[in-house]
Image (tube, helix red, strand yellow):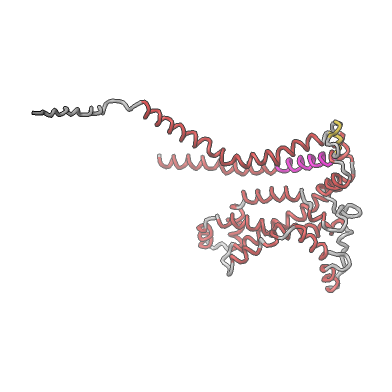
């Protein structure tokens, strides 16, 4: 006779609701919270770090290396040089060609940037209106920017030919005298500025058009109800709303205008700025010193002088920008105080 014994069932202990969680759970939860906190703090820097890393490699290092070369009598073959201090800068500043190039650069810059900005604002205002095939016209203004600068320079240099150019042919057909585009300094600047305007007007137009599209349409509807015409709306609504965008366009146009190279380089066959340096620019003068005379110490010094000129103008634009932003920022707290007073 056999007997079977059954094991007594042991019930699992019920967790006490008042008992704190396990240490491992606390550690996991704390780690996740710290990870989330560090993710919020570090992820923006990780996202923008590739740009700064590439800039340090291909931008910041060449800038520093150029600064070292500018203080030396550099030998490109031996890849070494003798330290001579600021003699290269003194030679540049005492060279009459530098002041001629500086004058030509600012002349071409003014002849290109001012009409370019006016034309870009006008074209953007026209494209902002309700016209037919507006997408086609908006895309068409960017076509000159896509064309290679060398192709633009070659085409326009032939158009502005002294003897058989298209422009002089039209002028003579109208009974006007032909213009010596490659001999007269002023008209050579006009021709080169025309090339620059042809390439960059559409680019600036799209930037200004994007800013115009961001203006609330309620402003224009209210102005129309008040009896304001299109020109009055443009002066009172559009232009004041484009302040920040206009400052950006002016800064980029200034930087690009002071670094102009392709157009004057391709304006004639020699590419040296004309027989009497009529359209010699700073970047073209830099190119002639570096690759024409093989004097990279002087070319580096000239590059740093140009960098300082652009930096000074950029700081002036930055000061204007900060003053405008500060003026807009001081009005908001006053409005907030008035609202609090009204609520009280």
Check residue 314 for magenta coloring.
yes
Task: From this view, report whether residue 223 is shown above or below residue 252.
Answer: below
Give me the residue at 69% from left, 44% from top: 317
Dividing the picture into quadrants, the one containing residue 143 is bottom right
Horizontal side, residue 210 vs residue 162: left or right: left
Task: From this view, report whether residue 220 is shown above or below residue 87.
Answer: below
Give me the residue at 56% from left, 41% from top: 47
Residue 101 in picture, x, y percent from top left: 84, 48
* Quadrant of the drawing holding the C terminus: top left
In the displayed orientation, state which residue is furthest to the right: 275
Horizontal side, residue 286 vs residue 240: left or right: right
Task: Give the magenta-colored segment's residue range.
Answer: 298-315
Residue 331 in picture, x, y percent from top left: 54, 42
Give me the residue at 83% from left, 73% from top: 174
- SS majority, magenta: helix
Horizontal side, residue 23 vs residue 328: left or right: left
Front one among 310 and 157: 157
């Amino acid at each position: 006779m056999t007997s079977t014994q059954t094991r007594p069932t042991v019930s699992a202990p019920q967790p006490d609701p008042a008992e704190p969680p396990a240490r491992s759970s606390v550690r996991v939860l704390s780690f996740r919270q710290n990870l989330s906190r560090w993710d919020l703090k570090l992820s923006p820097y990780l996202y923008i770090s590739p740009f700064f890393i590439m800039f340090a490699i291909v931008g910041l290092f060449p800038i520093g290396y150029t600064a070292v070369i500018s203080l030396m009598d550099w030998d490109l073959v031996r890849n070494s040089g003798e330290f001579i201090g600021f003699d290269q800068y003194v030679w540049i500043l005492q060279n009459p060609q530098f002041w001629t190039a500086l004058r030509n650069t600012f002349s071409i810059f003014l002849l290109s940037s001012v009409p370019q900005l006016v034309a870009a604002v006008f074209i953007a205002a026209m494209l902002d209106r309700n016209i037919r095939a507006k997408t086609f016209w908006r895309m068409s203004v960017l076509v000159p920017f896509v064309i290679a600068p060398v192709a633009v320079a070659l085409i326009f240099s032939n158009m502005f030919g002294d003897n058989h150019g298209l422009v002089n042919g039209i002028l003579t057909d109208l009974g006007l005298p032909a213009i010596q585009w490659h001999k007269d300094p002023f008209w050579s600047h006009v021709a080169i500025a025309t090339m620059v305007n042809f390439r960059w007007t559409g680019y600036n137009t799209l930037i200004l058009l994007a800013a115009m599209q961001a203006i609330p349409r309620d402003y224009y509807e209210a102005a129309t109800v008040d009896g304001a015409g299109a020109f009055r709306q443009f002066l009172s609504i559009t232009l004041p709303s484009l302040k920040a965008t206009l400052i950006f366009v002016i800064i980029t146009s200034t930087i690009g205008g002071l670094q102009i190279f392709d157009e004057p380089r391709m304006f004639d066959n020699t590419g040296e700025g004309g027989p009497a340096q009529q359209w010699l620019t700073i970047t073209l003068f830099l190119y002639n010193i570096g690759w024409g005379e093989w004097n990279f110490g002087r070319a580096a010094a000239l590059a740093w002088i140009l960098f300082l000129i652009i930096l000074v103008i950029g700081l002036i634009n930055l000061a204007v920008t900060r003053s405008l932003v500060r003026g807009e920022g001081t009005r908001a707290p006053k409005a907030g105080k008035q609202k609090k007073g009204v609520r009280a």
